Amino acid sequence: HSLPKGVTSAKPFPTADERAYHIFYGRMVSPNMSLQCVHPHLFKVSDMRTRDGHWITPPVLQENKIDEANVIAASMRPVCQLPKTMNPSIACLDESGMYLLDDRFSFYLFIGRDV
């Protein structure tokens, strides 16, 4: 949010509540989450693969195949297959696409003009 040159606002941006919220969560986040706050995930939801959005259940551990890879795969919980991530840049956005931006604090849905 920016104001035209010479125009002032009585309301500060960001507000004190918004600054306190981000400072509070900024102190408690892991390095992985802090990286996602400055480099968020961008998903193109208008061009998803066949299995995107489906739940994937890990394979059952087979008794005759107890190696490290099978044990790790069997110990995982079901996960949702996400679309491929894109570079979060304005240059990657297309007017005919729909995109979801995840910065760990909120989701933003961008819908192109040609959709």
Image (cartoon, helix red, strand yellow):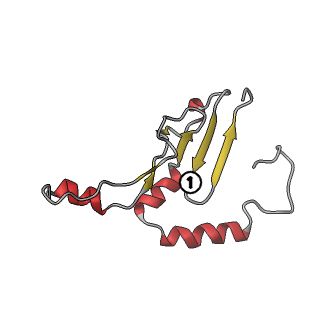
Is residue 51 found left or right of 66 in the rendered image?
right
Tally of marks: 1
Question: Residue 51, image x and y in percent?
Answer: 47, 40
Is residue 84 found left or right of 113 in the rendered image?
left
Question: Residue 4, image x and y in percent?
Answer: 83, 43
Towards the viewer: 45 or 90: 45
Towards the viewer: 25 or 60: 60
Q: Residue type at mark 1: give it.
A: Asp
Which quadrant does the C terminus fall into?
A: top right
Residue at the spot x=63%, y=53% of the render?
107
Q: Is residue 98 above or below residue 100?
A: above
Question: Residue 83, image x and y in percent?
Answer: 49, 41
Residue at the spot x=83%, y=63% of the render?
11
Residue 16, image quadrant? bottom right
Is residue 35 found left or right of 114 in the rendered image?
left
What residue does disc 1 label?
A: 103
Towards the viewer: 20 or 75: 75
Residue at the spot x=60%, y=44% of the render?
100
Towards the viewer: 22 or 54: 54
Residue at the spot x=70%, y=32% of the render?
112
Question: Residue 19, image x and y in percent?
Answer: 66, 67
Secondary structure type for disc 1 = loop
Q: Residue furthest front?
A: 63
